[in-house]
Image (tube, rainbow, N blue to C red):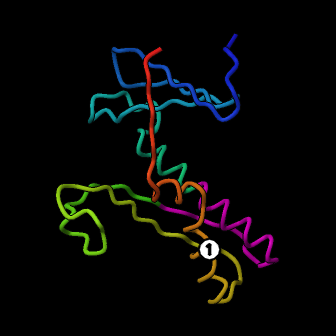
């Protein structure tokens, strides 16, 4: 029987022989891995794909919730995201000017008979999703051995 975990916690288990990881999030079971080309067995998304999935799903949910609350005719949302590493000097609007930095590029498709004003507002709302805000803020990660 699986051990109970507190609300909002995620448990990740793997062995030292490879990259595959078994993830428990509430009552959900997932697998993370690396592609074969990186030495994995490709049994699940890689960690950056999970990061993008979290951002994309939050973005889509936030847009849909806002449209529902406004009574707008949004029929569907598709969010496509890509992660890359770029030279900081190639980003004129970034504060970091040396070394490498992470870039996430996204495309959002909105289905439904929306006005241009509604579409523009929904793009603005996309940047307000909680995961987007978390990724753009300072993050304090504390890890300890137990």
Q: Write down the quadrant of residue 40 in the picture.
A: top left
Residue 142, percent across and down? 45, 33
Residue plotted at (17% across, 60% down): 98
Pick out the residue farthest to the top: 1
Q: Write down the quadrant of residue 100 in the picture.
A: bottom left
- Residue 39 lies, with reference to residue 128, above or below; the image says above
- Residue 22 lies, with reference to residue 34, above or below; the image says above
The answer to whether residue 11 is left or right of residue 93 is right
Helix, strand or loop under label 1: strand
- Residue 8 lies, with reference to residue 13, above or below; the image says below
- Residue 56 lies, with reference to residue 43, above or below; the image says below
Dot 1 alpha-carbon crowd within 10 angstroms: few under 14, some 14 to 19, many 20 or more: some
Residue plotted at (62% across, 31% down): 9
Residue 137, percent across and down? 47, 57
Residue 26, percent across and down? 68, 30
> Which region is colored magenta?
57-80
**Pick the front one: 141 or 46:** 141
Magenta stretch: residue 85 in it? no
Residue plotted at (48% across, 14% down): 146
Residue plotted at (56% across, 72% down): 109
Residue for badge 1: 110
Residue 94, percent across and down? 30, 68
Quadrant for the N terminus, please. top right
Magenta stretch: residue 58 in it? yes
């Amino acid at each position: 029987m699986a051990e109970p975990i507190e609300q909002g916690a995620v448990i990740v288990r793997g062995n030292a022989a490879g990259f595959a990881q078994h993830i428990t999030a509430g009552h959900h079971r997932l697998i993370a891995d690396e592609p074969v080309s990186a030495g994995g067995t490709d049994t699940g998304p890689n960690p950056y794909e999970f990061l993008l999935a979290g951002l994309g799903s939050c973005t889509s949910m936030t847009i849909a919730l806002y449209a529902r609350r406004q009574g707008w005719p949004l029929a569907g949302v598709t969010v496509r995201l890509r992660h890359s590493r770029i030279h900081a000097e190639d980003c004129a609007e970034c504060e970091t000017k040396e070394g490498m930095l992470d870039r996430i590029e996204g495309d959002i498709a909105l289905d439904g008979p929306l006005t241009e004003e509604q579409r523009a507002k929904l793009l603005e709302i996309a940047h307000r999703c909680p995961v987007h805000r978390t990724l753009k803020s300072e993050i304090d990660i504390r890890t300890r051995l137990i």
